Amino acid sequence: MSVKVLLEFQTQADQVDAAKEFLREVLPDTRAYDGFESLTMHQSDDDPTKFLFWEQWMSRQHYETYLAWRIETGTLKQFVDMLTDEPTIRVFNHVGV
């Protein structure tokens, strides 16, 4: 069953545009990754340095394999260097209600 992944992060104030450009460059690889289903990115109205990804993956294992690949390739570190802190990642399952 598909899982939803909620990823929240805050960029350094001077890195907002750089982070968005970096993500435009790397997200095609995310969208092509095995198990990927969908992703939308949202920017806070109240604080333009805060962002949210709402992702859907075929399974938690698919997402964790993808995340390990991003760590292994150094892409995640490049991204985190633009942030104020580590991103928050939460995984949710549909409960059928």
Image (tube, rainbow, N blue to C red):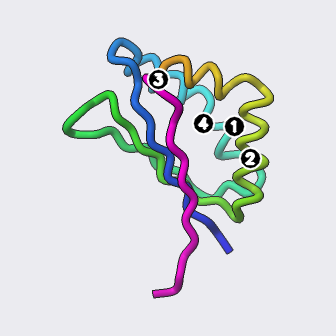
Q: Disc 3 versus disc 2: distance between alpha carbons?
A: 24 Å
Amino acid type, residue under disc 2 in the picture: Tyr
Q: Which residue is mark 3?
A: 83
Mark 3 vs mark 2, foreground winner is: 3
Question: In the drawing, does residue 58 fall left or right of residue 7?
Answer: right
Q: Is residue 88 above or below residue 3?
A: above
Which of the two labelled residues, at mark 3 and mark 2, occupies the earlier sequence position? 2
Q: Disc 1 versus disc 2: distance between alpha carbons?
A: 6 Å
Amino acid type, residue under disc 4 in the picture: Leu
Which element type, helix, strand or loop, lies under badge 4?
A: helix
Residue at 39 percent across and 18 percent down: it is 12
Q: Is residue 66 above or below residue 71?
A: below
- Crowding near pointer 3: few (<14 within 10 Å), some, many (20+)? many
Q: Position of residue 52 (x, y in %)?
A: 42, 44
Magenta-colored stretch includes residue 94: yes
Mark 3 vs mark 4, foreground winner is: 3
Q: Which residues are magenta?
A: 84-97
Q: Is residue 19 above or below residue 96?
A: above
Which mark, by number, is residue 27?
A: 4
- Crowding near pointer 2: few (<14 within 10 Å), some, many (20+)? some
Which mark, by number, is residue 29?
A: 1
Q: Disc 1 versus disc 4: distance between alpha carbons?
A: 5 Å
Question: In the drawing, does residue 60 fall left or right of residue 39?
Answer: right
- Name the residue furthest top: 14
Q: Disc 2 versus disc 4: distance between alpha carbons?
A: 10 Å
Q: Which residue is mark 2?
A: 33
Amino acid type, residue under disc 3 in the picture: Leu
Q: Position of residue 44 (x, y in %)?
A: 28, 40
Residues at discs 1 and 2 in contact (Cβ within 8 Å): yes
Residue at 53 percent across and 31 percent down: it is 86
